[in-house]
Image (cartoon, rainbow, N blue to C red):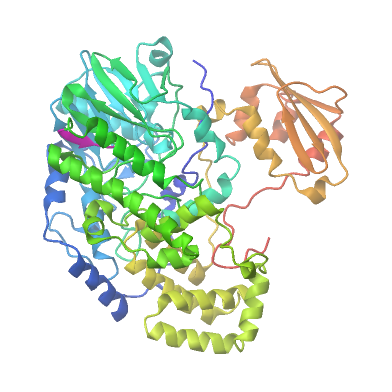
Amino acid sequence: MREKKLLICLFMGLYTMSMANTKLDYSKRKEATKFTIEKNNEVKKQLDFSNEKDFVEANKGFIATWPENKILDDKGNVVWDFEKFNFLGLEDKKESPNTVNPSLWRNAQLNKINGLFKVTDGIYQVRGFDLGNITFIRGDKGWIVVDMCTSIEVSKAAYDLLKKNVEDLPITGAIATHSHLDHFGGIKGVVSEEDVASGKVTFVAPESFYDESVSENLIVGNTMGRRASYMYGSILPNDEKGTVDAGLGKGVSVGTSTLLEPNKEVTKTGEKLVIDGVEFDFLMANGTEAPSEFMFYVPKYKAFCGAEVVNRTMHNISTLRGAKTRDALKWSKAIDQAIQLYGNKSEVFFAPHFWPKWGNDDINEMLEKHRDLYKYIHDQTLRLANEGKNPVEIAEEIKLPETLGNEFYNRDYYGTVNHNAKAIYDMYFGGWWDGNPANLYKLPPVAAAKNYVEFMGGEEVVVKKAKDSFNKGDYRWTVEVLNHVIFANPNNKQAKELSADAMEQLGYQSESGPWRAYFLTGAQELRNGVVKLPTPNPLSKDMISGLPMLNFFDYLAVRVNPEKAKGLDLKINIKFTDVNEDYSLVLKNSVLNSYDKLQKNSNGEITLKRETLNKILLGENTFENEVKNGSIKMTNPAVINKFINTLDSFEFWFNIVEPNTK
């Protein structure tokens, strides 16, 4: 079976999670200030921390967990470490330290609960082995697996745990609820390519599963990856002053990711499929948490799967690592449709993140309040926008009603009210501009920063006033004003250290795992600079072999430096002899266009096997070496070299909290 299109890592950069244990300097980290302690104590007063229901539900049905403290790959590398979050003190319900928002700490403890759990008769789930869960549904002859985690090592471990402790049966079906890597990357750990190709195993995914997963990530993957290193706290240690939780789960496994082409796509709500004797009723949710996504109901088990549309946290309308803005209204309506279709039928709810919920009344209450969470933020953002307020003003003003905001499953562990309101404004109004002509043609950051600092009386004055703000606990303003000093003069050590101290306190106060990670990573890099760690290739052989060439050429197009390409008029034909595919690249006007057919009157030609290109993309060899050994043949090499010389290389570890000098 040919593996067609693929996700070039929706979470491009998650591989950097494996760098969390790299030896970096963390000696400059500070304790929580009295203002942070007071802020976190306010959260303790606001929420009902005596409510133990989530802990009861998260532990319900526990059967067993992985017998070792780590999951390893074939080479002995650690794919998942069960011990790295032991500092959370789950067993003795350790109180939150001053350096962690108590609500986030509670969520972190819940997400640490791991193992194989019985959800209901016929449905089992392995949780806490990855960012997401893997679910097994009993069919007539075997197991139907739902969402296969990020890596094959984890999915295989989960399947082994199931076979050992429940029933040793083959996989007869597979379902990917949507196109994010942490939901299908481990598929080859439980299903073989041959079984899916032959139809022996039915592999179901939503319509446009591949197309949507590729479209936004390859071209901007470098920046997404760098921002993901902030969002997931990749360079931070796992401790009370560092990463405690990703908000949606503990973190991402770092094993081998794979992909298989589904042999069945669901295209409409109400479509029903019988897989190994079990009926599934699907509800399309495209344009909610993912461009291609569905939820489903299993009548046999009276069970509803909410995919990643329904979670025990507020999700992102716009993710901090960068992605297309999602539709909050469509999101709320998808949940409402689930209520209408399955609300009176469901006795158990489960999803690929977090733990299940049982009982029809409780399920409906959660679905209704989760629906209204997104609808409230959507409606109030537009109400305030129609009053003429800008996104920053709106985000500051919106507060959830207690009936929604005090539910733990609606808290800011992943998305936040603040940045989701801005995202909704972005979707309707284009985002970058608030309509004020003063903001239409602003100076770039460095130029503006120099002017701000000069107008405010110079660096020394600004830093002194910022220190006063810090001492009053006004950390947001401290960070904002010192950002101008740092961008005006990145060598101002005093400004960087004070800004780092303020960012750190904001991190300690954050209920959102990604917000905490962002602030603490910013503080780390202000104090110690950007440490250019190794950046291993996150792409597996499966991903590379399925990469559509026109998508790859679109990626090359964004690397064309217009100054280097100035005046060039090149046509290069490319022939892949092993797959019998021909392409051409046309470089003119400093723009690269690509075609899936040969161009007439080309002035250069490259002949190679697709297998050879795959090796280059995987880093197993270089273009130059493949030319030398004859695997790549070229006519008019001078022309081809001219084209290659126009391509910029992207530096992964570019500056974020300091001016980018390139």
The residue nearer to you, when weighing 221 against 511, is 511
Tell me: 7 left or right of 189.
right
Q: Toward which corner of the image does residue 384 lie, by quadrant? A: bottom left
Q: Is 430 contained in the magenta span?
A: no
Name the spot of residue 204 as percent of width and height, x first: 38, 22
Tell me: 321 left or right of 110.
right
The residue nearer to you, when weighing 367 against 238, is 367
Task: Check the image and report above or below for 599 versus 247.
Answer: above
The residue nearer to you, when weighing 2 against 539, is 2
- Classified by dominant secondary structure, the portion drawn in magenta counts as strand
Name the spot of residue 91 as percent of width and height, x first: 14, 54
Task: Check the image and report above or below for 652 versus 391.
Answer: above
Q: Toward which corner of the image does residue 300 lie, by quadrant? A: top left
Callout count: 0
Residue drawn at x 64%, y 67% as measured from the top left: 437
- From the image, which quarter does the C terminus lie in? bottom right
The residue nearer to you, when weighing 404 against 479, is 404
Farthest residue toward the front? Answer: 387
Q: Which residues are magenta?
A: 347-351
User: Quick check: can you spot residue 240?
Assistant: yes
Residue drawn at x 62%, y 80% as measured from the top left: 452
Tell me: 17 left or right of 125.
right
Residue drawn at x 53%, y 79% as measured from the top left: 495
Tell me: 127 left or right of 645.
left
User: Quick check: can you spot residue 352?
Assistant: no
Name the spot of residue 98 as percent of width and height, x first: 26, 71
Name the spot of residue 302 as percent of width and height, x first: 17, 27
